[in-house]
Amino acid sequence: MSKRKIYNIEEWAGKTVGNFTITGNTRTIGTNKTWECQCSCGNIVWKRASEIMLGKYTCCSNCVVISSYENSGPRNHHWKGGRFIPQTYITKLCLNRKSKKLPIDIDVEYLESIWTGYCSLSGLPIAINDTASVDRINSSVGYLKGNVQWVHKVINRMKMDLPEEEFNFFCTAVAQRGKERRGGNCL
Ligand SMILES: [Zn+2]
């Protein structure tokens, strides 16, 4: 008799547990089966399958923080922003851009429409109000629709105003050299 499959992702994919939607992507870390979940705020998290099935976690850590400060979430009537991206992302772009000449023609609705939960350049998971940052694809142009992407804030800091190709070139060189220095071992 075959052992019953407990962590049957096919049965769970697409289902929701609290604020989480189980995407169906899985990873095994050591002996732990982990599942990718998308929180209703847009954040992507990986949790142990057993903990999701038991309902131990029902939203991401950001939402825990937000709900504990009732006044800062989208459900509050003072909330300014879209479904899950706060207006502060646009306000900060207006305040922080180096040249006031750079036009800004995007809004939170647009930022939400291009949100995937992952950094466009590195593929790393990113979180709103934490590691997520808005990057201009062509930095000689402003924050316009089609010219912005979500990236990890560290990646954004490293990229500065470099064109993507040049940034990739330097990243590859660093990774290659790092591999050589470690005697050919990746990471
Ligand atoms: Zn969340």
Image: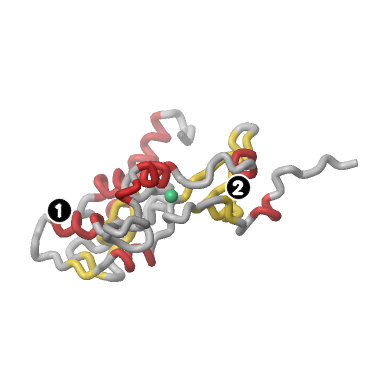
Front-lying residue, 165 or 86: 86
The label number, if any, that marks residue 26 in the structure image: 2
Circles 2 and 1, Cβ within 8 Å, touching? The answer is no
**Quick one: quadrant of the N terminus?**
top right
Left or right: 35 as drawn, with respect to 138: right
Q: Is 68 placed above or below 145 here?
A: above
The image shows residue 19 at horizontal and vertical percentages of: 51, 52
Q: Secondary structure at mark 2?
A: strand
Give the image quarter of residue 162.
bottom left
Left or right: 124 as drawn, with respect to 34: left
Disc 2 beta carbon < 8 A from ligand 1?
A: no
Give the image quarter of residue 140.
bottom left
Left or right: 62 as drawn, with respect to 147: right
Disc 1 target residue: 96
Residue at 25 percent across and 68 percent down: it is: 106
**Of the residues under marks 2 and 1, which one precedes in the sequence?**
2
The image shows residue 119 at horizontal and vertical percentages of: 38, 52
Q: Residues within 10 Å of mark 2 (few under 14, many from 20)?
A: some
Residue at 61 percent across and 59 percent down: it is: 14
Q: Secondary structure at mark 1?
A: helix
Left or right: 36 as drawn, with respect to 97: right
The image shows residue 167 at horizontal and vertical percentages of: 29, 51
Q: Amino acid at mark 2?
A: Thr
Residue at 19 percent across and 54 percent down: it is: 92
Q: Amino acid at mark 1?
A: Asn
Q: Is residue 27 visible?
A: no
Residue at 63 percent across and 41 percent down: it is: 54
Residue furthest to the top: 182
Give the image quarter of residue 107.
bottom left
Front-lying residue, 173 or 163: 163
